Amino acid sequence: MLDEVDDELHTRRAPPARVGLVRMLSTALKRSAVLLSALLLLGACADGASDEVCGPGPAEAAFVAGEVWTYRGSDSDATFTVLCVEPLSDDVTVVHIATSNIPHLPFDEATLVRDRVSLVSSQVAVDESWLEGRQMWSDADGGIWTIPLAEAVDFVLGAVDQ
C-alpha cells in the first residue's frame, strides 16, 4: 500500500513555478533554522550583567576564567579565551569561551580538554560584555557544544555567512 501512495505522490507534480517557490522557501527556512540554532547556542554579545552569574567555577575544573589556549584543528595562532566555568549538572561542566570572531560559545569541558593544545596566558581580563549573551543562552535553555572546537567555529561562521 505504501508503494501505491509513493507512486501516487510521484505522479502528482506541482507546476514548475510552484516547485521553484517551494525550493526557495525550503532553502530559506533551512538557513533560518541553522542561524537560529547557532544564535541560541551563541547568545549575543552586549553590555551589562552582574558578576553573580558566574562564580569562580568548580574547584576541580580544568579551566579558569581568563585563560587563553590554542586549540587543535585551527590555525597555529587561533585561540579561545575562557570566560567562565560553571556546573551544568552533576556530571557536566560548561565552559563559556570566546574566539577571535565569536563572542560566546558554551562548551562541554571534556571536549575542550581534548581540544586544547597550549596555555598562552592565564591572566587575561575578561570583559563582561558577553554576560548578556550567556543570560539569553540560559533563558532559552541553550545547549552546549560537544563537537571539536574547530568544527563548531567553522559551523557557526558558515551559518552566519549564509
Image (spheres, helix red, strand yellow):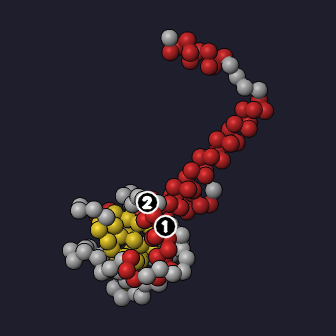
In the displayed structure, 16 sits above or below 140; it is above
Q: Earlier in the sequence, mark 2 or mark 1?
A: 1
Report the front residue among 77 and 135: 135
The percent coordinates of residue 8 (x first, y second) are: 62, 15
Circles 2 and 1, Cβ within 8 Å, touching? The answer is: yes
Kind of residue at badge 1: Met
Q: Residue at x 43, y 59 (%)?
A: 142
Q: Which residue is mark 2?
A: 142
Which quadrant is the C terminus positioned in? bottom right
Q: Which mark is residue 25?
A: none
Instruction: Tell me, yes or no, if residue 78 can be seen here.
Output: no
How many marks overall? 2
In the displayed structure, 126 sits above or below 34; it is below
Circle 2 SS class: loop
Q: Residue at x 36, y 58 (%)?
A: 146
Image check: 63 left or right of 12?
left
Q: Which residue is mark 1?
A: 136
Instruction: Tell me, yes or no, if residue 88 can be seen here.
Output: yes
- Could you give the CA–CA distance between mark 2 and mark 1, rounded to whole angstroms? 8 Å
Image check: 84 left or right of 59?
right
